[in-house]
Image (cartoon, rainbow, N blue to C red):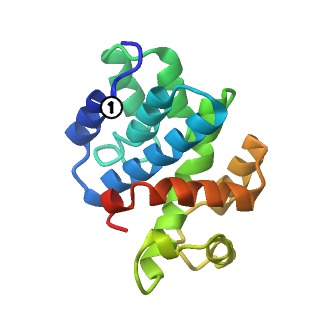
Amino acid sequence: MNTPNRDEAWALLTEYTKNDNLLKHALAVEAAMRHYARSFGEDEELWGAVGLIHDFDYERYPAMEDHPFKGAEILREQGYDESFVKAVLSHARHTNVPRETQLEKTLFAVDELCGMITAVALVRPSKKLADVKIKSVKKKLKDKAFARAVNREDIVEGADGLGIDLSTHIGNVITAMQGVSDDLGL
C-alpha cells in the first residue's frame, strides 16, 4: 500500500478507536498536518493520513511499551510503506525513533499542541476554537497544573524542530483546528 486515502485511514482509525475524544484528537492532528502539508508544499493526503492514524492503536494498547509499537506492527501487516510506519513511530518520544523528515518533525510538533489547544478551548466560556487566542495558549502552557498530561517540552521542541517561532506555530495549529471545529465539537 502506498498512501491510504482518507476513507481507508478513517476506517483503520475507527476499527481500533471508539473513544470520541481520541477520534477528535485524531481529527485535530489530521487538520494540523494538512495545514502544514499545504504550507510546505507536501502531499496533503499522506500527511493527513499520518495525522489521522498516528494514535489509532492507543485505545487498545495505551501502555508505553505497546503504543505505538503495536500500531506499527499492524501497519506493516497491512502493507503500509515503512516511511509511513516510521512517521507514526517517531511521534512518540519514548520510541527513540529519530525525527528526520519534515513529515516526522511536523507530526511531533502538532500532536501535543492539538491537545493543549483543545484544553484551552474547553475552558473558554463559549467552548469554541474561534475564541482561542495565541496568548491564551501561551499563558496556559506556563500553568503546569493546567492540562497536566500535555507535554510542554514536546510543544516547544516541536516548534524548534520546524524552525518556526512558537507563537506562529500555535497560530497555525489554531487556524487548522478552526477549520474542523464542527467535527471537533468546538
Residue type, label 1: Arg
- Image quarter (top left, top right, bottom left or bottom right) of the N terminus: top left
Camera-nearest residue between 17 and 130: 130
Most extreme residue toward the bottom, as rendered? 125
- Position of residue 34 relative to residue 84, above or below, is below
* Count of numbered marks: 1
Residue 150, visible in the rendered structure: yes
Name the residue tied to disc 1: 6
- Position of residue 85 relative to residue 115, above or below, is above
Residue 131 rendering spot, x and y as whole percentages: 51, 76
The residue lying at 27 percent from left, 27 percent from top is: 8
Res 99 quadrant in image: top right
The residue lying at 54 percent from left, 65 percent from top is: 116
The residue lying at 31 percent from left, 51 percent from top is: 23
Mark 1: secondary structure? helix
Residue 159 left/right relative to 64: right
- Image quarter (top left, top right, bottom left or bottom right) of the C terminus: bottom left
Residue 153 rendering spot, x and y as whole percentages: 69, 58
Residue 95, visible in the rendered structure: no
Residue 24 left/right relative to 46: left
Res 144 quadrant in image: bottom right
Residue 65 left/right relative to 58: right
Residue 121 rendering spot, x and y as whole percentages: 47, 73
Residue 130 rendering spot, x and y as whole percentages: 48, 71
